[in-house]
Image (cartoon, rainbow, N blue to C red):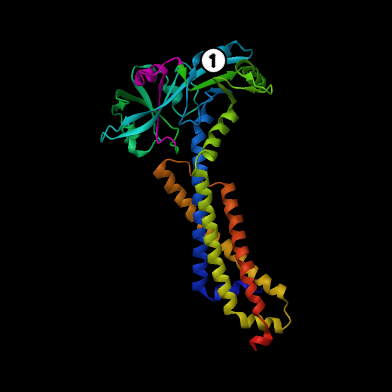
């Protein structure tokens, strides 16, 4: 069995090979982490949107994201009940308040979600069995996946201890737990009844809501009902195109895209993560170029000898490109393994959904191959100097 020349070239200088593989792995880790953080940002920002059991959503046109929701009149939500094939409507209140850590008394902003506990409209673990609890005055549910800065609420509650604290200066008691997860906009979450929400935010008008949830009858066409609601609430502009007045009507997919668009276009976060991945790509390309260029330069007499023996330039180019592909594939494996470990570490530390998936793994692998082959394409220019007449 013949050993490829490219592999023999790479393994001849083992320390140089190890340095090259370490550099490629480092570049891969940089790209993996940037893509991981970016995906975690988008995924964490829409978990709530996916968990709400609704077909159509009403929000204020002034709202920009879940962390910056404006309100509108609950009357608009009730008007929807008059449209054919609308099954039910539910209001959701959303705001931020200061949470007091019951252990060290420090304060931190937390997202407060108020719902009507008559019906479970949020598909989360432990929600259904805790609906009766939040009907009690000043009882709330705490997100066990919130950041640790809010205190060991989950641990204390699981031990059967009574957990009381303050939200917006009002004394509340933990009546149960649920699992939603932190996001880049909210470090933690609590859910309570609309009445308890009104007690926490006494200054707010209870007839104003942040999100209206609409469920349609089984078998009905949500798109047709969506169009009817828009005809009801929207007005035509000069071009006879319907535009929203005081309420924006969205399908669930549009509600999710609405949130994603904010983080992608209205913040610099997406650009920063993309730039970080690009920097990792460039760093890896420079490292591989230096390794391949040095390898070609060190073996220039051997390449000249091969030319004198009748081997073509194309064959020599193949050798260098084979080296580049070998470096890409072998260097990718430790980068992939370490990135999985770092993803797990990051998820445990931040409660953000930083997970490895096929798309991410494939994207970085393709970028690694392009990075190494591109470096090889630049390094092969040195082969032009492999002229037997000059060297010998």
Q: Where residue 274 appears, x then y in whole percent?
A: 53, 49
Q: Is residue 388 above or below residue 141?
A: below
Q: Is residue 291 above or below residue 275?
A: below
Give the residue at the far top of this rendering: 82
Secondary element at tag 1:
helix
Q: Is residue 78 above or below residue 294?
A: above
Of 12 and 250, the residue lying toward us: 250
Taking the magenta stretch, the answer to whether it contains residue 280 is no
Give, as a single range, the part of the protein colored magenta: 185-207
Q: Is residue 238 above or below residue 159?
A: above
Of 264 and 388, the residue lying toward us: 264
Q: Which residue is found at the position 42% from the left and 20% from the top?
A: 131
Q: Where residue 358 appears, x then y in whole percent?
A: 58, 47
179 vs 280, left or right, is left
Let me know if residue 108 appears in the view.
Answer: yes
Q: Which residue is found at the position 57% from the left and 68% from the top?
A: 289
Q: Where residue 328 appears, x then y in whole percent?
A: 58, 62
User: Label 1 belongs to which residue?
Assistant: 76
Q: Quadrant of the C terminus?
A: bottom right
Q: Where residue 177 appears, x then y in whole percent?
A: 39, 29
Question: Badge 1: few (under 14), some or many (20 or more) residues near its Cα, within 10 Å?
Answer: some
Instruction: State the image quarter where residue 82 is shown.
Output: top right
Count numbered badges in the picture.
1
């Amino acid at each position: 069995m013949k050993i490829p020349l490219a592999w023999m070239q790479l393994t001849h200088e083992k320390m140089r090979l190890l340095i090259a593989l370490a550099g490629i792995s480092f570049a891969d880790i940089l790209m993996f982490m940037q893509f991981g953080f970016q995906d975690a940002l988008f995924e964490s920002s829409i978990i709530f949107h996916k968990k709400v059991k609704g077909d159509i959503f009403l929000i204020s046109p002034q709202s920009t994201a879940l962390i910056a929701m404006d309100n509108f009149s609950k009357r608009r939500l009730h008007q929807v009940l008059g449209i054919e094939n609308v099954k039910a409507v539910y209001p959701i209140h959303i705001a931020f308040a200061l949470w007091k850590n019951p252990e060290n008394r420090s304060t931190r902003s937390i997202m407060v979600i108020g719902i009507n506990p008559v019906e479970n409209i949020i598909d989360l673990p432990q929600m259904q069995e805790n609906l009766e609890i939040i009907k009690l005055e000043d009882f709330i549910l705490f997100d066990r996946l919130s950041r640790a800065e809010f205190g060991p609420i989950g641990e204390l509650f699981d031990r059967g201890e009574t957990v009381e604290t303050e939200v917006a200066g009002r004394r509340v008691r933990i009546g149960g737990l649920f699992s939603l997860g932190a996001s880049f906009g909210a470090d933690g979450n609590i859910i309570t009844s609309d009445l308890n929400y009104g007690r926490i935010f006494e200054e707010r008008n209870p007839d104003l809501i942040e999100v209206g949830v609409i469920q349609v009858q089984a078998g009905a066409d949500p798109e047709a009902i969506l169009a009817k609601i828009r005809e009801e609430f929207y007005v035509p502009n000069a071009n006879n195109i319907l535009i929203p007045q005081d309420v924006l009507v969205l399908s669930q997919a549009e509600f999710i895209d609405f949130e994603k668009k904010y983080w992608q276009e209205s913040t610099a976060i997406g650009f920063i993560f993309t730039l970080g991945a690009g920097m990792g790509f460039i760093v890896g390309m420079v490292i591989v170029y230096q390794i391949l260029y040095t390898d070609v330069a060190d073996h220039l007499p051997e390449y000249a000898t091969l030319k004198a023996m009748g081997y073509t330039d194309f064959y020599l180019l193949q050798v260098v490109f084979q080296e580049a592909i070998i470096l890409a594939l072998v260097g990718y494996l430790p980068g992939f393994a370490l990135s999985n470990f770092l993803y797990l570490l990051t998820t445990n530390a931040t409660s953000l959904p930083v997970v490895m998936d096929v798309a991410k793994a494939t994207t970085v692998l393709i970028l690694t191959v392009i990075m190494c082959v591109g470096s090889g394409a630049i390094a092969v220019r040195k082969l032009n100097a492999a002229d037997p007449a000059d060297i010998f």
